[in-house]
Amino acid sequence: MSAASAKSSRDVLLRIHRDAQEYLRNQFAISWGPRYLASRGFTEVITQTWAIGYAPGNGTALFNHLCAKGHTVEQLQDAGLVVITRTGRPIDRFRDRITAPVLDEDGHIVAFIGRASPAAPPSTPKYLNSPNSDLYRKHEILFGLAQAESRLAVGAQPVLVEGLWDAIAVSTDYRFAGLAPCGTALTAHHVDALARRAPVRDLGVIAAFDSDPAGHRAMLSAYEKLTSVTDHTYAVRLPPGRDPADLLQIGGPDYVANALDGLSHLADFVVDAVLDQAATAPDGYRPLDHAEGRLHALRASTAVLIGKPAADVHRQIRRIAERLGETVPTVMAAYVDNPRREIDLASTGLPTSRQALLRSFDRTAATDDRRALSARPRSPDLAPSR
């Protein structure tokens, strides 16, 4: 396909998404959406700001509307808004769902996320995303990033969350910008996109994923990727079983903001999760009471520090020593000799010899981590937005 043809095709798909969004927005007010979202703490101002819409449930409402606008079945399939049944009948991909538009870095609508009705059968997927297309590659686009451009430009803190309602809940305070890799795990493409739009190297990033095994895995994945663009990574320990959208429903924007202000180091969260897993076994067996279990815990916890910022390595080696009842030299040796270490220590800013590394730990023993957290960069220009 020539460049001119590709641009023409892209322009058609963008126009389809604009036409779809106009229709979905008009349908929202007469749906169950406003009442449901109000019960979750999302005000009319919020739903208008985020352009929330509604896809009717009769199966062809959006299809019929877009066809009347002159779009063909093939174009609507390419846009990911129509699917063809086994009988050859075109139907809407999104049916009886609240919708939110997904924007690319230029602010164009390239996809939608749909939330099913609370009354839907249990077999119905709660969330449905547009499929990958020529416009939309979900592993590259963070939901909320385009909407947050103005606040990120003046220093709002990026906050990575799991879903779109969490991103919107976080963004009710103007000091924060909620971002979600909806429908997929956080990728290096997501992190690169964030780094292009926000001064994350100096400002840092907060991770606020759910407090469940999937959330713990997301935290570990986020730490692995975020340290490529910043040395300042933070975590919010959410109440068990709660996410930012739950906090908004319980206590409003102030409750969400208070939770986000209660930060710890993301490396703390990751190392604690690894050690907790290493200490867990069925039938009452206590792995850390045995030499092989302790060796596994040492290797697993130091492995997540390979190639990470020097400040994180210093802090976590001390924390691992405290949690396992080991000496700092023992944990340091496990780090230096870890089988997964594939990089030169010098690339992390750490000394290259074990002896010099130990001396460097001694010099940083008095670090006040609470002061380091409270002094994280924040823009004085920002004011809360309610």
Image (spheres, rainbow, N blue to C red):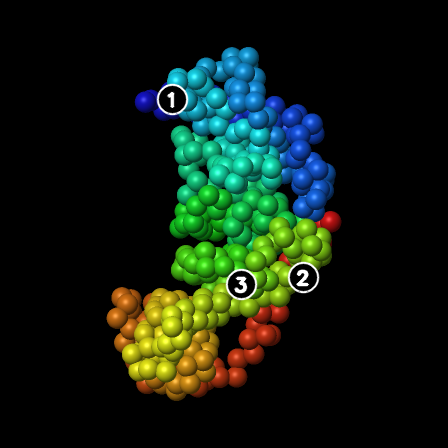
The amino acid on which the numbered mark 2 sits, given as a three-letter code, is Asn
Asked if disc 1 and disc 3 are in contact, CB closer than 8 Å, the reply is no
Above or below: residue 95 compared with residue 40? above
Question: Who is closer to the viewer here, 154 or 54?
Answer: 54
- Choose the circle earlier in sequence order: 2 or 1: 1
Q: Which residue does the numbered mark 1 point to in the structure image?
A: 86
Q: Which residue does the numbered mark 2 point to in the structure image?
A: 258
Q: Does the rendering let one see residue 202?
A: no
Q: Residue at x 41, y 31 (%)?
A: 133
Residue 64 place in picture, x, y as percent: 54, 16
Give neighbour class at mark 3: few <14, some 14-19, many 20+ (Cα, 10 Å). many
The amino acid on which the numbered mark 3 sits, given as a three-letter code, is Ala
Question: How far separated are the C-alphas under marks 1 and 3?
Answer: 46 Å
Question: Who is closer to the viewer here, 87 or 310?
Answer: 87
Count up the numbered dots. 3
Q: Residue at x 55, y 68 (%)?
A: 264
The amino acid on which the numbered mark 1 sits, given as a three-letter code, is Arg
Q: Does the rendering let one see residue 304?
A: yes
Question: How far separated are the C-alphas under marks 2 and 1?
Answer: 51 Å
Above or below: residue 78 compared with residue 319? above
Q: Which residue does the numbered mark 3 point to in the structure image?
A: 235
Q: Which mark is residue 110?
A: none
- Choose the circle earlier in sequence order: 3 or 2: 3
Residue 317 place in picture, x, y as percent: 41, 78
Quadrant where the N terminus sits is: top left
* Horizontal side, residue 302 vs residue 25: left or right: left
Above or below: residue 64 compared with residue 117? above
Residue 26 place in picture, x, y as percent: 66, 25
Residue 256 place in picture, x, y as percent: 66, 56
* Horizontal side, residue 265 vs residue 40: left or right: left
Question: Who is closer to the viewer here, 265 or 122?
Answer: 122
Q: Residue at x 48, y 57 (%)?
A: 215
